[in-house]
Amino acid sequence: MTTPAPVPTTADLLDFLNLDENYDPGAAADALAAALDAQRARCLVVPYCAPLREAALRRAAKILVARRAPLGQVDGGDFGAMYLPRWDSVVEELEADYRLGSFA
């Protein structure tokens, strides 16, 4: 049985990304809300647990990065443009045991 964990907050997301409170809190809150909505659509989230929390934070981080990359590319500096991956295998693995039947 997994240990219950609190649903992540905007402050948790900023801490996860090592950003301070001066970062746009509205953008972070929107990204986290979208990540949690996506998770609820795919997973059984009661009781909420640590793997789901980690997956939600990773999903929200990706949403924040994608805001500045409407074509799916980010500037990699000396490495050139890099594509944002569509799927995050870590999120998939963390949520695997909690997927609803239609997503299993």
Image (spheres, rainbow, N blue to C red):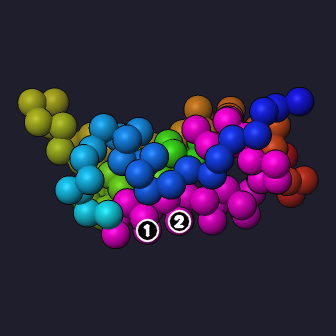
Q: Position of residue 32 (x, y in %)?
A: 49, 59
Q: Residue at x 73, y 63 (%)?
A: 41
Residue stretch in magenta: 26-54
> In this image, 2 relative to 24: left or right?
right
> In this image, 1 relative to 37: left or right?
right
* Residue 41 magenta: yes
Q: Amino acid at mark 1?
A: Asp
Q: Is residue 63 visible?
A: no
Contact flag, marks 2 and 1 (Cβ < 8 Å) = yes
Q: Residue at x 67, y 36 (%)?
A: 50
Instruction: Check disc 1 and report the residue beneath it.
Output: 30
Instruction: Check disc 2 and report the residue beneath it.
Output: 33
- Taking depth in this image into account, of 75 and 4 the one nearest to the observer is 4
User: With respect to residue 37, does 93 lie above or below?
Assistant: above
**How dense is the environment of label 2, judged by Cα within 10 Å: few (below 14), some, or many (20 and up)?**
some
Q: How far is disc 2 from disc 1 in space, using C-alphas?
A: 5 Å
* Residue 58 magenta: no
